[in-house]
Image (cartoon, rainbow, N blue to C red):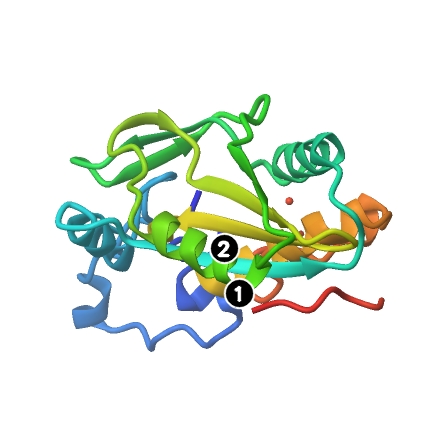
Amino acid sequence: MNWMWRSDAPPLQERGLARPRSDARSSRVAVPDRPEPGRLNLFQRTMLRWRELHPYNAVHVVAIPAPLDARRLQDRIQHRLERSGLTGFVLDSKRGRLRHGGGRAVVDLKILEGRADPTDLLWREIEAQLNTPFATRGEFSPFRFFAVDAGDSFRLGVVYDHFVGSGDSIALLLQGIALLYIGTAMSDLPALAPRLVPPCRSKPSSI
């Protein structure tokens, strides 16, 4: 499931590179098995160890130039997660496994009224989210969302358990939600990890 921190790349011979010259010595060398599906790579397992000491979260925020409609936003988040297959996660941290069974997305969305001072409220919420842990075992969602209402626009943030993916894929996930919110078709959204896995405009500004 390592949809960004990919550990299942095929052996070099399967990527079009020349096979090593066969001789008596090389014929005795066993080809290592591919990693098991759902098995976290070394870096991911290391991050799980870090989060035993303190939450190892990350946050991205996008500015959406439209009024906040909480029901519409929740629907777009749910749609993006479900269509991207990012639901039904089950973590076995002791064995370093992460499975995802799909199904209906459970959206954790917090709405904040920030019209008086949206920037200050945004930074305080980012700090709080960075220090709030995710579940350490069993079924869970590695994503939480929050929106700061600024009147004619709003800021949408996603906080995520960092071992599930890198920042560029999560930024594309968030960008896709923002584009869905302002009316872009799902088929026109960017893939989550275009350089690593196959697919499963005036753009909003982001940080």
Mark pair 1, 2: CA separation:
25 Å
Circle 2: residue type: Leu
Residue 27, disc:
none
Judged left or right of residue 15, residue 81 is right
Residues 31 and 129: in front is: 129
21 lies above or below 199: below
48 lies above or below 169: above
Please identify the residue farthest to the left as the structure is shown: 53
Q: Earlier in the sequence, mark 1 or mark 2?
A: 2
Which one is closest to the eye, mark 1 or mark 2? Answer: 2
Q: Residue at x 63, y 32 (%)?
A: 82
Quadrant placement of the C terminus: bottom right
Query: Residue 92: percent from the left, percent from the top?
Result: 25, 31
Query: Residue 54: percent from the left, percent from the top?
Result: 18, 50
Q: Residue at x 22, y 69 (%)?
A: 26
Query: Residue 16: percent from the left, percent from the top?
Result: 53, 71
Q: Secondary structure at mark 1?
A: helix
Residue 198 appearing in the image: no
Q: Which residue is mark 1?
A: 168
Quadrant placement of the N terminus: top left
Circle 1: residue type: Asp
Residues 3 and 139: in front is: 139
Judged left or right of residue 13, residue 132 is left
Q: Which residue is mark 2?
A: 121
Residues 73 and 89: in front is: 73
Q: Residue at x 51, y 57 (%)?
A: 122
